[in-house]
Amino acid sequence: MLVTGVKTFRTGLRFALLFSLLPTTSTNLLGKAPARVPASARLTISVYNDAEVPVDVMGRAQEQAGRAFRHAGIEVTWLNCRVPAVSEEASRTCREAVFPEHLHLRIVRKSLGLKGETLGISFQGEDGSGCYADLFYEPMEQLQKSDGADIASLLGHVAAHEIGHLLLGNNSHAAAGIMHAHWTTEELASARVGGLAFLEKESRRMRARLATATQASKEGPSTAARIPARTGD
Ligand SMILES: [Zn+2]
């Protein structure tokens, strides 16, 4: 993972998403949501709100991200994980990480080691698998101030972008849509009204990955990639 560039906004502030290596290109327009979501296309996301994002902002962000995935034929269940957890069972459920069907998002104020304009990062192995992504809230607040971005919408779309990386594997940037590496001012405006979406080929790829994993789980628990939580909370 590395930062390969930044987008300059009209205010002069520079922001970028962190992404994996070579970008892919696509000119496809947005795909249509399938009529129904098959049982296999289900995704659980544990969310750790270390940045203390207000509850209403978090709710709207999850709505936005959920809509983008629903459009791609994937139904998301959000687990808002508290530390300490309300019960041992809640703690256990939140900590579980199973690639690719149970992923983790952690929202922190800012990155300790990355450029200040980075909005999010996903952690993937060389084989393209990984369960964890971090989102950085402070640069989103700056974008809200400088460009009038709707912060809930922005948070939701950055969440969808990083989860998209986890589901799509390495080299998963596109020329347009949610997986675009550098969102333009116009795309930010689209994000504000929930207009960014996954491309059809991305949607197919994510559904196929989830379906393959579900099939592997059915064939035996040993074939599912169970990954322990990164932290002990
Ligand atoms: Zn990216």
Image (cartoon, rainbow, N blue to C red):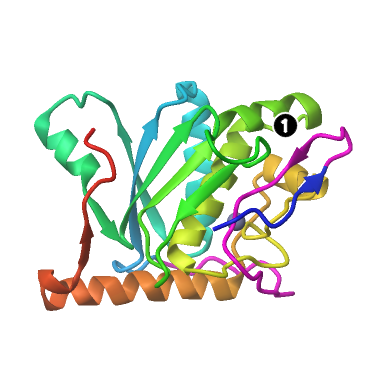
Amino acid carrying label 1: it is Leu
Quarter of the N terminus within the rendering: bottom right
Report the image quarter containing ligand 1.
Answer: bottom right
Main SS type for the magenta part?
loop
Question: Could you tell me if residue 67 is visible in this image?
Answer: no
Percent position (x, y) of residue 108?
48, 31
The single residue placed furthest to the front in the displayed view is 113
Q: Give 24 or 30, whichever is nearer the viewer.
A: 24
Q: Residue visible at 20% across and 27% down?
A: 85
Q: Is residue 145 left or right of residue 18?
A: right
Residue 56 rendering spot, x and y as whole percentages: 49, 24
Position of residue 179 measured from the top left corner of the image (x, y, whole percent): 62, 60
Label 1 CB sits under 8 Å from any ligand 1 atom: no
Q: Nearer the viewer, residue 4 or 214?
A: 4
Name the residue that disc number 1 marks.
143
**Numbered range of the magenta stretch:** 9-36
Q: Is residue 30 located in the magenta-colored stretch of the structure?
A: yes
State whether residue 224 appears in this view.
yes
Q: State the residue at coordinates (80%, 34%).
A: 13
Q: Position of residue 18 (x, y in %)?
A: 60, 51
Q: Nearer the viewer, residue 92 or 127?
A: 127
